[in-house]
């Protein structure tokens, strides 16, 4: 299993990318959405809308099979908003965690 951590946000004091064997403590989902089978811009638009609805200090889990969303659009969205971002490969999909600060 490949696990990649890309975290942003002043509240966490993190801004780096690394490969880790374990999920960070904060990456436990409060809300989960499944956007498998969707391509750009649907995953980003869906995540953006859900983050607006999500109360602060909550974690959104996104399940996707769209590689560009994991590599580019969702990390960029998290960085722009100042939220922590973490993703891991799970079978044929990715689980992405975004912590709303």
Image (cartoon, grey):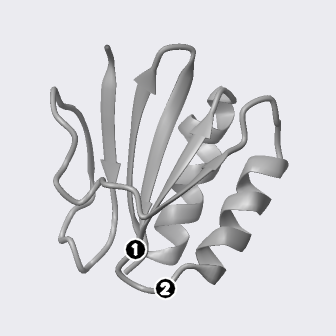
SS assignment at label 1: loop
Residue 67: x percent and y percent?
63, 27
User: Between marks 1 and 2, how big is the CA–CA gap?
Assistant: 6 Å
The residue shown at (66%, 26%) is 65
Label 1 environment density (alpha carbons within 10 Å; few <14, some 14–19, many ≥20): some
* Residue 58: mark: 1
Q: Is residue 79 left or right of residue 4?
A: right
**Image quarter of residue 26:** bottom left
Q: Is residue 26 left or right of residue 87?
A: left
Q: Residue furthest bottom?
A: 56
**Image quarter of residue 77:** bottom right
Looking at the image, is 84 positioned above or below residue 95? below
Looking at the image, is 56 positioned above or below residue 80? below
Q: How many numbered discs sit on the rendered protein?
A: 2
Q: Is residue 65 left or right of residue 62?
A: right
The residue shown at (31%, 54%) is 28
* Residue 9: mark: none
Q: Residue under circle 2?
A: 55
Which quadrant is the N terminus positioned in?
top left
Residue 46: x percent and y percent?
75, 59
**Image quarter of residue 18:** top left
Q: Are marks 1 and 2 in contact (CB under 8 Å)?
A: yes
Which quadrant is the C terminus positioned in?
bottom left
Residue 87: x percent and y percent?
41, 39
Between 18 and 45, which is closer to the camera in this rendering? Answer: 45
The residue shown at (55%, 79%) is 54
The residue shown at (19%, 49%) is 24
SS assignment at label 2: loop
């Amino acid at each position: 299993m490949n696990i990649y951590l890309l975290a942003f946000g002043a509240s966490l004091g993190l801004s780096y990318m690394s490969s880790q064997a374990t999920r960070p403590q904060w990456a436990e989902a409060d809300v989960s959405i499944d956007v498998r089978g969707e391509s750009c811009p649907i995953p980003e638009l869906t995540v953006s809308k859900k983050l607006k609805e999500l109360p602060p200090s909550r974690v959104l889990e996104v399940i996707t099979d769209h590689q560009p969303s994991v590599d580019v659009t969702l990390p960029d969205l998290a960085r722009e908003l100042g939220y922590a971002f973490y993703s891991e490969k799970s079978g044929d999909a990715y689980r992405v965690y975004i912590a709303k600060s």
